[in-house]
Image (tube, helix red, strand yellow):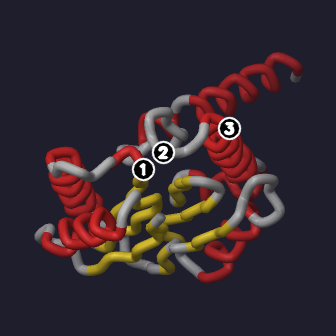
Amino acid sequence: MGNNFFVKSLIALFLLAFVPALTNCSGTLATFGDDRSREQTLTDTEIILNINKRLLSGKNRPLFFSIKVDVFAGRVMLTGTVENEIKKQNAGSLVRGLIGVQKLYNDIQVTQSPRNTSNDIWIDAKIRAQLLATKNIKSLNYRWRVVNDTVYILGYARFPSEKAEIVRIIRQTSRVRGIVDRVKTN
């Protein structure tokens, strides 16, 4: 029994540490180099790890594979798809009460249809390339997800013109059906 617990603990540790970093093209784990303080970056990383820990526990485990977590300056954005409103609300309740969380955006879609993953990946890559290539946009200040052709974006714009340019780029990206803007401006 002790050996089985040890193996399960190692698997959970691996999932907490590496899977989010591998599966998140927009940066699940907090990154250094954006406009947050070192302390805020560490707090955001701790929030992500605590949410993932809760998602991996017991009956919540299936949600871990359906939901993506992004955090910027204490603001948490949940995206992905679930089959019903109860699962969406359960995911949101896992975030409430965590230290450091200032705002929760529960943007999880409730749908019976499978995700259009290949199209979402294409949109994500196109947006990433455009934001990286655009002068005067600090893309490290943003986290975005594409779910069923809708782009959810979280972050901090240094200037109103930067935010306007990002929204313009996303809206003009082909195949994007909608944008949910969670970007704060200075």
Label 1: element kind: helix
Q: Give the residue pinned by disc 3.
A: 39
Q: Please say whether residue 12 is visible from this viewpoint.
A: yes
Q: Distance between the residues labelled 3 and 2?
A: 12 Å
Q: How dense is the environment of label 1, judged by Cα within 10 Å: few (below 14), some, or many (20 and up)?
A: many
Question: Do callouts 2 and 1 mark residues in contact (Cβ within 8 Å)?
Answer: yes
Using residue 8 as the reference point, say whether residue 115 is left or right of it. left
Q: Please say whether residue 56 is visible from this viewpoint.
A: no
Q: How dense is the environment of label 2, judged by Cα within 10 Å: few (below 14), some, or many (20 and up)?
A: some
At 13% from the left and 72% from the top, the residue drawn is 172
Label 2: element kind: loop
Q: Distance between the residues labelled 2 and 1?
A: 6 Å
Q: Quadrant of the N terminus?
A: top right
Q: Distance between the residues labelled 3 and 1?
A: 15 Å
Q: Give the residue pinned by disc 1.
A: 141
Indicate which label's residue lies in the foreground, 2 or 1: 2
At 58% from the left and 72% from the top, the residue drawn is 105
Instruction: State which tag comes first along the sequence, 2 or 1.
Output: 2
Instruction: State which tag comes first along the sequence, 3 or 1.
Output: 3
Viewer-closest of 144 and 114: 144
Label 3: element kind: helix
Q: Give the residue pinned by disc 2.
A: 35
Residue 177: % across, % down: 24, 79
